[in-house]
Amino acid sequence: MSVLSAESRRDYEIHSYPVLIYALVPIAALVLQAWLPRVLGRFAWFDLPLVVTVFFALSRRNPIQGSILGGAMGLFEDALTGLPIGINGIAKTLVGYLAASVGVLVNVENHAIRLVMTFVLSLVGSVTYYFVVRFLLGMSIDTNWLAELYKAIGNSLIALVLFPILDRTKIRD
């Protein structure tokens, strides 16, 4: 019985998806994230670009790709929502990097692990966002941490539904 090294395990479990999935899923997440909070108002307890970033970062297991995807998703989200450009970019870059880095170390095919990862990374993204706005930009920010907890729960529930659907689009060898 051979023991897989970290490098061979990483090479073995990298998933790929059709190009249309890589293009359409992030675009759909960004459009829905810009539109749904206007419909739902204060009950918009989710961050679809973050969920998509976590999914692709966990699947690809490449911290560089996870960082780039997270940064791009965050920048486009900032552009669509009218927030200062770069705040969500920084937060989602960190989330993408952490998700891919943990994906290298842990078997993320388990739905419970993915659920916990999405929950924790949602909170990490919220704390990073708060830190950037409050301490790096020096702006005052009213943060309702209970709402951030609800958002992390909402992201986890969306991931519970979305991840298996996206898993079905994997390119199988």
Image: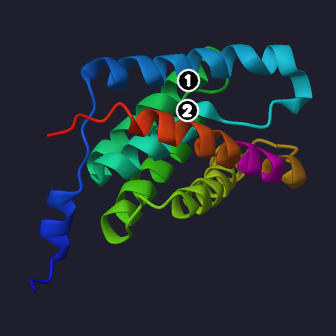
Amino acid on which the number 2 mark rests in the picture: Pro
Classify mark 2: residues with Cα within 10 Å, few (<14), some (14-19) or many (20+): many
Q: In this view, does 25 lie above or below 13?
A: above
Q: Residue at x 35, y 30 (%)?
A: 169
From the top left corner, tell me how far across and down residue 86 is, in percent: 53, 33
Q: Which of 79 and 1 is in front in this view?
A: 1
Query: Do the CB atoms of the residues marked 2 and 1 lie less than 8 Å apart?
Result: yes
Q: Is residue 169 among the parts visible in the rendering? A: yes
Q: Which of 29 and 64 is in front in this view?
A: 29
Asked whether 152 falls inside the magenta stretch, the response is yes
Residue occupied by mark 2:
49
Callout count? 2
Classify mark 1: residues with Cα within 10 Å, few (<14), some (14-19) or many (20+): many
From the top left corner, tell me how far across and down residue 64 is, in percent: 28, 48
Looking at the rendered structure, the secondary structure element under dot 2 is: helix
Question: In terms of sequence position, does the residue under pointer 2 or pointer 1 come before the other?
Answer: 1
Q: Which residue is drawn at 34% across and 26% down?
A: 22
Q: For residue 33, which quarter of the picture?
A: top right
Residue occupied by mark 1:
29
Q: Which residue is drawn at 34% across and 39% down?
A: 68
Asked whether 81 falls inside the magenta stretch, the response is no
From the top left corner, tell me how far across and down residue 124 is, in percent: 62, 57
Figure quadrant of the N terminus: bottom left
Judged left or right of residue 107, residue 161 is right
Alpha carbon separation for disc pair 2 and 1: 5 Å
Amino acid on which the number 1 mark rests in the picture: Ala
From the top left corner, tell me how far across and down residue 47 is, in percent: 66, 35
Q: Nearer the viewer, residue 46 or 74?
A: 46
Give the magenta-colored segment's residue range.
149-154
Figure quadrant of the C terminus: top left
Q: Is residue 81 among the parts visible in the rendering? A: no
